[in-house]
Image (cartoon, rainbow, N blue to C red):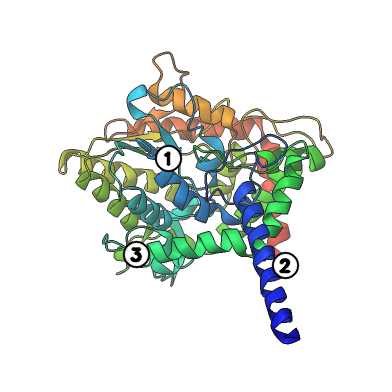
Amino acid sequence: MRVRSFILAWLVTGVAIASCTAAINWLIDPYLMFDMPRLRHFNERKPSVLTHEREMKAYLVKRAAPTTVLIGTSRVALGLDAKHPAWPERLRPVYNLGLPGGGPYTWLRYLQHALSDDGIKEVVIGLDFEYFLAPDGWYQDPAKEGTEFDHRLAVTRQGIPNQFWRRQRLIDVGQALLSLDGLRDSIITVRANLTADSADLDRSGNLSDAEFRRDVAQLGAFPLFENRNRQTLQRLAIELRLRYSDGQREVSPMAILRLILELCRKHDIAVILFVQPVHASLLEAYDLLQHWHDFEAWKRDLVALAGDFQRRRGLDLSLWDFSGYNRYSEETVPEPGDRKTRLQWFWDPAHYTRSLGDVIIRSLFAANAENFGVRLTADSLEQHLDRTRQHQKLYQAAHPETRARLAQLYQGISKR
């Protein structure tokens, strides 16, 4: 009897612990799995987005049932506001499907997933030049990019229903309710909501800029620019070029972008492509390491691709360029040690603030928009590229310190 009583007590205790864990995780909902009410100072902000964003957005985009989806990297996730009032009523609701570190293959797979439900009418894609570069001898099966999330998507790479999707959802629900990781993240969520600010993901997919604001407050803007420029120079120092040939067309970033456009054409979805703005120092890094020719060649390729889908395939598509030298990209970076000055338009050379994202949205859709961005066509491209070169020379003459600082960083990298 004592053994039976012990086993029964052990089982009751185990069930009680599991039930309490499940109740806590369900109520706090750190991964946004259960669409629980978000209560201020309790579970309103979701810091688990820093480690679970791809999982969270795979489920949230289905729940949001958007008319428009925004696709791209962290620059889109942070910079574009899916709730901005300038979005036309016909395109709402908008969902921000930008994913940090996600390249063209990730965009394709998450778009396939979102399109497994009807209702999407517009896709807005932010393009990053660096994601279209790779070293010589490069060969990569793009499926490897998706191993961590493919089972969470409603369709396979081939566009057929994913037999693992519902099973993966049950696994994710079970882990969100019963795992110690889930309980730990619930505790972290409550603790984060007791502080002034933390990372967060809202219902529209917008990623909070709290991490950048914290870094600027603690370190100042200068180290963020310095570190990002150093990372860019390290990557560009490798022998890189645009990848879309040499027998690898089926896996190249440009080929995957073509697949995305073809998918939109089949679903009768309008597309806006836009080259994302970057700070002038990042443009100078391209030029310093002799990638300006590639940068222009990439834009020519985009224009050719857009023209092909517009003329021959009947896709409703527009292509915009928000990169270049202008009053936004030439924003002055604070001096080292300055922790008070916060830039208006950029967090670092690659990530623009939501203030600049708002300018982009208004430029695309508002009648009284600022004069920002150029719509690229075969007729306008070369004039635009020439004008950008002229502005580049003016910037270099006015700001020789930017180029000198980049050269100094590059020398430090080369000596390692």
Circle 2 sits on which residue? 416
Residue 404 spot, x, y in % from top left: 70, 44
Q: Position of residue 110 (x, y in %)?
A: 39, 53
| Residue drawn at 27 percent across, 31 percent down | 379
Front of the two marks 1 and 3: 1
- For this orientation, the residue located farthest to the front is 1
Q: Disc 3 marks which residue? A: 251
Residue 88, given in percent of the width and then of the height, sits at 37, 23
Proximity of marks 2 and 3: CB atoms separated by less than 8 Å: no
Q: Is residue 21 above or below residue 265?
A: below
Say which residue label 1 marks. 64
Q: Is residue 408 visible?
A: no
Query: Residue 64 vs residue 235: left or right?
Result: left
- Dot 2 or dot 3: first in sequence order is 3
Q: Residues within 10 Å of mark 3 (few under 14, many from 20)?
A: some
Please give the name of the residue rendered at 65% of the width and 36% of the height, measured from the top-left corner: 39
Q: Residue at x 47, y 35 (%)?
A: 389
| Callout 2 crowding tier (Cα within 10 Å): few <14, some 14–19, many ≥20 | few
Q: Calculate the distance from the C-alpha at mark 2 to the C-alpha at mark 1.
A: 48 Å
Q: Amino acid at mark 3?
A: Val
| Element carrying mark 1 | helix
In three-dimensional space, the C-alpha distance between marks 2 and 3, rounded to whole angstroms, equals 33 Å
Kind of element beneath mark 3: helix
Q: Quadrant of residue 123?
A: top left
Q: Is residue 41 left or right of residue 57?
A: right
